[in-house]
Image (tube, helix red, strand yellow):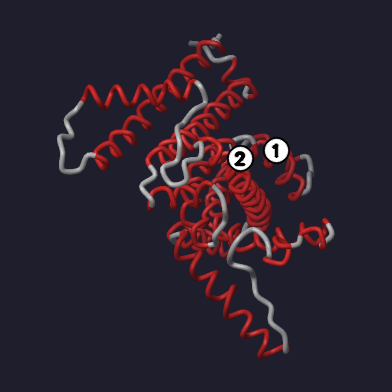
């Protein structure tokens, strides 16, 4: 039997090695920037500075920001809830669109729909997120207001900056909780759409292919032979066996979301760690960039570790596999 503890220990070792490798490369890069024109080949100084930084990390001390001299960890934790809100909303929206769409295309079982959505997913895969963000900002943030003014006599457009309206930010007590909630939701629309398009294409493609593969299984043929309706076959017999492999897709989505946050949060002025990272790079705030690199690396590797362990725990075929 596969030893769960041995597997966890191996993945934990991989987690630590990857964190050391990523942070050392980033530290070396910023060390080189700080010593431009001088002697870069100072292995003793590099290693000493790097391990001093890790000793501080063990005390939850990532240093002070060069820009405002505030603790790096405090600045990251202050901005992380905004990024978490955006990413959770993006993931929920992506799954709510892509999963029913894949079920619908499988149920219809027509080549026209299959080829059409395959083409659409290829287009979504190829569109850069910064271009989508700019297009959404121009058309839905500006020109939509001019169109509604000309056609209906009033302006309606989506907000393209921040997490809430200026009126709500200045005097939140004058608004009910429902008004504050809808205002926040309204500001989420464009960033969520921008960050979800690639995810929708990826989830749809993976889930559709998984459903198509399962539909050729013998137990699906047996269910049809028993007179089970096609909709019930797709939703219950095929669907429940295709959902669990989505954990693999989830592990692929997290790095993509965190990397796209740099662009999306900057374009839409969303106050998360992506915008914080962009500002830190522009200001050459080395301690803050190092802290953000460590923080995002821990999220990505920790998520992958948790998903793999969940896969191992819930999948009986892996638990019963022999060494």
Q: Quadrant of the N terminus?
A: top right
Q: Which residue is mark 2?
A: 214
Dot placed on the residue nearer the N-terminal end, 2 or 1: 2
Q: Is residue 217 above or below residue 53?
A: below
Foreground: 164 or 242? Answer: 164
Alpha carbon separation for disc pair 2 and 1:
10 Å
Across the whole image, how many numbered discs are drawn on residues? 2
Label 1 CA crowd tier, 10 Å (few <14, some 14–19, many 20+): few
Q: Which residue is mark 1?
A: 240
Q: Quadrant of residue 183?
A: bottom right
**Farthest residue, direction front:** 69
The residue lying at 43 percent from left, 47 percent from top is: 67
Q: Is 33 on the left-hand or right-hand side of 9?
A: left
Q: Nearer the viewer, residue 281 or 143?
A: 281
Which structural element holds mark 1?
A: helix
Is residue 245 placed above or below 202 in the rendered structure?
above
Query: 226 left or right of 112?
Result: right
């Amino acid at each position: 039997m596969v030893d769960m503890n041995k597997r966890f220990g191996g993945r934990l070792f991989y987690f630590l090695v990857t964190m050391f490798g990523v942070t050392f490369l980033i530290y070396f890069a910023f060390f080189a920037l700080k010593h431009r024109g001088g002697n870069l080949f100072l292995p003793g100084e590099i290693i000493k500075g790097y391990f001093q930084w890790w000793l501080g990390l063990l005390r939850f001390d990532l240093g002070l920001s060069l820009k405002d001299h505030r603790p790096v960890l405090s600045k990251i934790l202050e901005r992380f809830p905004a990024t978490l809100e955006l990413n959770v909303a993006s993931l929920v929206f992506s799954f709510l669109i892509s999963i029913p769409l894949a079920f619908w295309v499988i149920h219809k079982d027509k080549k026209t729909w299959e080829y059409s959505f395959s083409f659409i997913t290829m287009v979504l895969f190829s569109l850069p997120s910064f271009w989508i963000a700019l297009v959404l900002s121009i058309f839905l943030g500006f020109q939509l207001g001019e169109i509604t003014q000309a056609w209906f006599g009033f302006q309606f457009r989506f907000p393209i900056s921040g997490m809430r309206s200026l009126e709500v930010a200045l005097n939140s007590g004058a608004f009910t909780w429902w008004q504050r909630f809808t205002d926040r939701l309204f500001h989420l629309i464009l960033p969520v759409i921008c960050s979800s398009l690639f995810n929708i294409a990826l989830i749809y493609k993976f889930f559709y292919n998984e459903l198509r593969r399962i539909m050729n299984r013998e137990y699906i043929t047996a269910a049809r032979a028993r007179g089970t309706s096609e909709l019930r076959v797709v939703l219950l017999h095929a669907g429940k066996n295709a959902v669990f492999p989505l954990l693999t897709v989830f592990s692929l989505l997290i790095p993509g979301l965190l990397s796209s946050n740099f662009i999306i949060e900057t374009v839409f002025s969303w106050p998360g760690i992506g915008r914080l990272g962009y500002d830190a790079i522009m200001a050459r705030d080395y301690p803050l960039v190092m802290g953000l690199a460590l923080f995002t690396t821990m999220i990505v590797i920790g998520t992958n570790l948790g998903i793999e362990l969940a896969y191992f725990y819930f999948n009986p075929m892996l638990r019963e596999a022999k060494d």
